[in-house]
Image (cartoon, helix red, strand yellow):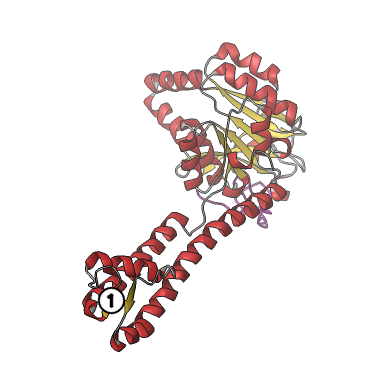
């Protein structure tokens, strides 16, 4: 398929470069052993040119013998030398050919295996997450997705730098090298069948082009875009973004809040840091919580997602919780069976008998 050379799959456990180096070292060792054998018994060999065999002649004989070239200008003339050739040199010649042919076959079959892996990936990739840009923001987005239960194989990284894609491959991610403003690059990453697209470009105008292209390729995908300037927010939304994160304003607001209230700054840092302390999460309403008001839920409820609409906890439209609602809550970062991490599809554990929405046993 056209463009396959731009797609980089994570390397398997076997490093082909190390394998080839190891085979070359084995071949050189075999060659050195044969040279030593011939040189040690050089008086039993005859040279048709000058009659004597020196070190260079030993290397020459070992090379043409192991490669089965056999010009015949240097030959074993004594019975002992011929016996050594049968007992030692012949097995070493076979070993040398196995190493040589094996390396060639491995180089050829590795390309075939890589193409098969790529074809299999193209057939199975769908409903995945594409992250455009693997810089600081892109890496943080990947880490957050992984912490929240998204499998590594369901994440594809797009970047125009080969070295960056190599880093992504080293982390177990599929990478696509290319300009993300081009539709062909996004097609290689599977954007037309992706579930989410995260854009973390370094320039807002680039983010606009990427968002427009991604939306054109996939009208249904959830597109999240990071922009630097607030004035570009409306333009990004018009381009097709579902969620826009203003990085400069967010950082500036956190700096200001941390200055006014260091404690508040620490809490906000804790909330956006995954893996410890408090964490903001989205989970489904459990059967025991249906019919309750958000404040009766034992979690701290920030908002309710109902029929695709985000309602703050104090919105009168929330009323009582109903089946199908999802809660945006603040909870401890450690796993709780009744509050699965976002991105998973676990069924909540059976609740206890407390009818007031308390913690479930």
> Residue 317: where, in percent of width, then height?
75, 27
Q: What residue range appears in magenta?
A: 334-361
Residue 31 occupies which quadrant of the picture? bottom left
Q: Quadrant of the N terminus?
A: top right
Q: Residue at x 54, y 25 (%)?
A: 201
**Residue identified by numbered label 1:** 46
Q: Quadrant of the C terminus?
A: bottom right
Q: Residue at x 70, y 34 (%)?
A: 305
Q: Which residue is drawn at 59% across and 41% down?
A: 5
Main SS of the magenta part reads loop
Q: Which of 115 and 307 is in front in this view?
A: 115
> Residue 51: where, in percent of width, then height?
24, 73
The answer to whether residue 308 is left or right of residue 69 is right
The answer to whether residue 349 is left or right of residue 74 is right
Residue 282 occupies which quadrant of the picture? top right
Q: Which of 143 and 277 is in front in this view?
A: 143
Q: Can residue 300 be seen in this snapshot?
A: no
Residue 322 on the magenta segment: no
Q: Residue at x 59, y 13 (%)?
A: 232
């Amino acid at each position: 398929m056209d463009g396959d050379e731009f797609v980089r799959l994570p390397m398997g456990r076997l490093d082909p470069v190390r394998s080839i180096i190891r085979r070359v070292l084995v071949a050189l060792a075999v060659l050195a052993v044969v040279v030593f054998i011939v040189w040690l018994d050089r008086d039993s060999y005859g040279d048709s040119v000058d009659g004597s065999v020196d070190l260079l002649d030993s290397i020459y004989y070992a090379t043409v013998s192991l490669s089965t070239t056999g010009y015949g200008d240097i030959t074993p003339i004594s019975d002992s030398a011929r016996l050594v050739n049968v007992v030692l040199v012949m097995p070493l010649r076979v070993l040398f050919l196995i190493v040589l042919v094996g390396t060639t076959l491995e180089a050829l079959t590795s390309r075939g295996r890589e193409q098969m892996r790529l074809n299999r990936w193209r057939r199975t990739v769908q409903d995945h997450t594409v992250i455009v840009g693997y810089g600081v923001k892109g890496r943080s987005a990947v880490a957050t997705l992984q912490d929240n239960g998204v499998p590594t194989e369901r994440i594809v990284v797009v970047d125009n730098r080969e070295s960056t894609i190599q880093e992504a491959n080293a982390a177990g991610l599929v990478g696509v090298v290319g300009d993300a403003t081009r539709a062909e690059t996004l097609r290689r990453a599977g954007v037309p069948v992706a579930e989410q697209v995260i854009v973390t470009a370094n320039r807002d105008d680039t983010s606009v082009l990427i968002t427009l292209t991604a939306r054109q390729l996939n009208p249904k995908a959830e597109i999240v875009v990071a922009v630097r300037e607030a004035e570009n927010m409306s333009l990004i939304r018009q381009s097709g973004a579902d969620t826009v994160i203003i990085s400069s304003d967010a950082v500036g607001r956190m700096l200001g809040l941390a200055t006014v209230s260091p404690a508040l700054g620490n809490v906000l840092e804790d909330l956006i840091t995954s893996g410890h302390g408090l964490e903001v999460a989205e989970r489904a309403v459990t059967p025991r919580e249906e019919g309750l008001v958000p404040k009766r839920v034992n979690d701290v409820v920030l908002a309710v997602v109902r029929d695709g609409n985000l309602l703050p906890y104090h919105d009168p439209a929330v009323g009582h919780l109903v089946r199908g609602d999802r809660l945006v809550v603040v909870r401890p970062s450690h796993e709780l069976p009744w509050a699965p991490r976002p991105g998973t599809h676990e069924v909540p554990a059976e609740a206890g008998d407390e009818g007031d929405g308390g913690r479930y046993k």
